Amino acid sequence: MQQAPEFIYKVVTNEALSEVAEGNSFIGMPVDLDDGYIHFSTAEQLAETLRRHFAGQSDLRLLAVKTSTVAQVLRWEPSRGGALFPHLYGPLPLSAVVWSEEISVSKDGNVDLPEAVQ
């Protein structure tokens, strides 16, 4: 694999994130709990992730995580067409979140990503 990107991204519902507002870590969305790891996307993978899994949803928040802060428990594993996706095996420390922004995805899967996505 090439050098890891500086940031990875997690899409969460505002409801799921509010459930951990008092804690200092996020254990994941229901799909993450089912799979045993927290799903992330790189900037290049993000639009397709949103189109496939979040079309028509508006109560979403995008979390930007500095990759180096979670590297010890992060694995890059093949998924769609063999692309390597970042999977976090363990809770996400909220201190690793550099920024978050509300987003919504149209019914056809289109989304305007924040300018800070890199």
Image (spheres, rainbow, N blue to C red):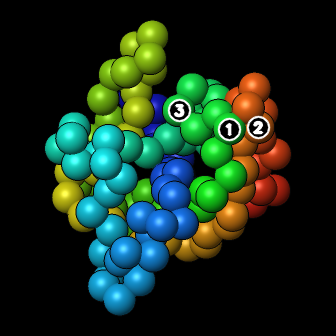
- Amino acid type assigned to the residue bearing label 3 in the image: His
Q: Please report contact status of discs 3 and 1: CB closer than 8 Å, yes or no.
A: no
Residue 78 visible in the displayed image: yes
Query: In the rendered structure, are the residues bearing label 1 and label 2 in contact, judged by CB atoms less than 8 Å apart?
Result: yes
Other-residue count near label 3 (Cα within 10 Å), few / some / many at <14 / 14–19 / ≥20: few
Return the x and y of residue 12 as percentages of the image width and height: 49, 56
**Viewer-proximal residue, 99 or 5?**
99
Q: Name the residue located 71 percent from the left edge and 42 percent from the top edge.
A: 105
Mark 1 or mark 2: name the one nearer the start of the chain: 1
> Which labelled disc corresponds to residue 56?
1
Query: Residue 81 placed where, x, y %?
Result: 45, 10
Q: Which residue is the site of mark 3?
A: 53
**Residue with the most extreme bottom position:** 22
State the quadrant of the N terminus.
Answer: top left
Q: Secondary structure at mark 3?
A: helix
Q: Is residue 87 visible?
A: no
- Residue 54 occupies quadrant: top right
Q: Amino acid at mark 2?
A: Ser
Q: Position of residue 31 (x, y in %)?
A: 32, 41
User: Which of the two residues, 44 or 47, is positioned nearer the viewer here?
Assistant: 47
The three-letter code of the residue at mark 1 reads: Gly
Q: Whole-Å distance between the Cαs marked 1 and 2?
A: 5 Å
**Residue on which disc 2 sits:** 106
Q: Secondary structure at mark 2?
A: loop
Residue drawn at the location 45% of the way across and 76% of the way down: 18
In which quarter of the view is residue 82 placed?
A: top left
> Quick check: 86 left or right of 45?
left
